[in-house]
Image: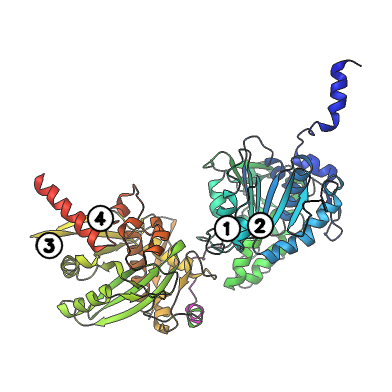
Amino acid sequence: MDAATLVKEAFKEFTPPKRVKISVWAAEHFELPETSAEPGKWNPTRAPYQPGILDAVCEPGVQKVTLMCSAQIGKTIILLIIICYLIHLDPCSMLMTQPTTDMAEIFSKEKLSSAINNVKPVSAKIVQKSRNASSTILMKMFAGGFLRLAGANSPSSLASMSIRAYFGDEIDKYPASAGKEGDPVKLAMQRTETFWNWLVFLVSTPSIKENSRIEDEFEESDQRRFFLPCPHCGHRQHLVWERFQYANKDSKEADPLSGVYYICESCDRPIEEKYKSRMLREGQWQPTAVAKDPKHIGFHINRFYSPWKGWVDLCLDYESSKDDHQKLQVFWNATLGLPFERVAGEKLDWQRLRDRGSQSNYQQGIVPNGGLILTAGVDVQADRLEVAIVAWGRGEESWVIRYEKILGDPLKPDVWEHLAHVTSQPYPHQSGAELRVRAACIDSGYLTQEVYHQVRKYRYLHWFAIKGVSGDGKPMVSRPTAQEVNYKGDRIKRGIQLYKVGVDLAKETLYARSQIETPGAKYLNFPKNLDSNWYEGFCSEVQVTKHRNGQPYMVWEKLAGVRNEPLDTSVYALAAAHLVGITRIKWSTVEKNLEAPIAEDIQDNDDGCEQSNGKAPNNQTTNVRSRSRTIKRRRG
Ligand SMILES: [Zn+2]
């Protein structure tokens, strides 16, 4: 034996194992627990989409993996396999979060422990007890690292620990903030920053559109989908709900058992479920987008791919849930693996919102804790003004603070004087401080010149003239245009700026937010003593599909016999929040300065629209800035 071989032999035991594909490793080592539906060795061909997800974790250059999926596709197995693989072959410091600490304990006891016990090379590495530490339910120690399990509701367990690999499970069920520390997923991801070879794996069934972390992450990824070849024409496609067909789909007298087919997007021929397992075996993951960061890859899979549930059963699930909003959401999230969007033509349930309001813990007129800035929305009618005062806080959570009809003729000064009072008076905050309205948006669609005149007169109260514009793709607030000529064509001295408000986007935003059930980011809060008419008015419009030249498009329509001012004023108050730069406010500064909000809480930005209005929040700053501008103009 020569020296080189001798050295090699001597160090054999210390040579790190060769990096093997996770799916290859799992096929050799991973055993499904006795309690699972199919106990025994993990079989890579059973659910052919699983190996591709597993192996991605070891793909060169990949550091972040997002899995947006339906229920019952084996996501827990995927997580357990990756964790066991790392413990065996690439041990390091790891953190896994579940929605709550209780759920983390249950996950550890019911899933993780049996997985570890069943995989010999992994259980051999676990340190049950040593001089310095011992494994517990929420902390697994092993040679070369540890796995900590934590609840996303517990800020202390997310802080002050450096980790190389982070696993976030069911991230759409996490609270908006862990205590006061902020988004738990962001907190956990920050913990990996000190490692050059960090790894993040996020997985969840999605929740509601507008409020889905996993969807936001998936959209930033390369959006891989599992493409299956058509048995007739060979065209590869990923399965979407819209192309499933059976007799009388979506009709009241459905008989969904009379044949469920998938209609090929290329040859239009029906594909029977008997081809499913063959198609799955020949399936391939393909990216459908360019990732924002090439290190980030994402997967989406729905339950129609699952080998454990038939298409007919899933279509029956749909049939039994399609008439019930809550059940339909479950179908969307848990079967299609998609964030739930309200369906066009669906009315909002105003009684449900009213019932929620009646459970509220605050009354009109007082700003509850969490509300940090105020804006107003004003609608002009022939015999009155209607005004909503809305408070905004972190994550754009909002609180209706006051709703009032100011009766009188808007062509006379009285109603405007009253509005000036409503928008300038201080509103008491639960903390004992006082808040004032930072911006009021007043609709100029009716009595346009009078509104311009009043906005000019009361501009020192941060009144803004707005005009609602409908149509897809219109931004919440557009750059203003100067209105310097009145209806007679005469020049107006010191004309006003008119802001266009994308009312369709604003309504969609408010209606989507009204479906969020847990207080936190984007949640709408209503005071205890808000009138039923307000809720009916807020829910007074419905989005319907129309056709132009055969092309479908969406429009908002008012329900018959209901006033829609509560919705309109909410839209204008939301626009006002965007005028004061709500997406860029430094909330910590506002919190510190509750009594005297200052303009510096708006961060610098290069978005012309919001920037031009960063001046709005504060009298002093506005005056100083406008004065200096006037001087410059005179000099120029
Ligand atoms: Zn085909």
Residue 340 within the magenta-colored segment of the rendering: yes
The amino acid on which the numbered mark 3 sits, given as a three-letter code, is Asn
**562 relative to 173, above or below:** below
Q: Residues within 10 Å of mark 2 (few under 14, many from 20)?
A: many
Report the residue marked by disc 3: 486
Give the alpha-carbon distance from disc 3 to disc 1, as whole Å. Answer: 53 Å
How crowded is the residue under tag 3: few (<14 C-alpha within 10 Å), some, or many (20+)? some
Which residue is outermost to the left? Answer: 490
Q: How is the image coloured?
A: rainbow
Tell me the number on the disc at residue 97: 2
Furthest residue toward right: 1
Residue furthest out toward the top: 2
Residue 483 appears anywhere in the view = yes
Give the amino acid type for the residue marked by disc 1 in the picture. Pro
Q: Secondary structure at mark 2?
A: strand
- Do the numbered discs 1 and 2 sit on residues whose CB atoms are within 8 Å? yes
Q: Which residues are magenta?
A: 337-355
Q: x, y percentage for residue 352?
A: 51, 79
> Sequence-wise, which precedes: disc 2 or disc 4?
2
- Left or right: residue 279 versus residue 438 is right
Q: Specify the principal SS of the magenta part.
A: loop
> Mark 2 or mark 3: which comes first in sequence?
2
SS class of the residue under badge 3?
loop
Q: Which amino acid does the dot numbered 4 rest on? A: Pro
Task: Tell me which amino acid carries mark 2.
Answer: Thr
| Disc marking residue 184 | 1
State the separation of the CA atoms marked 2 and 3: 61 Å
Q: Are marks 2 and 4 in contact (CB under 8 Å)?
A: no
From what the image shows, is residue 583 above or below residue 281?
below
Residue named by callout 4: 480
Mark 4 or mark 1: name the one nearer the start of the chain. 1
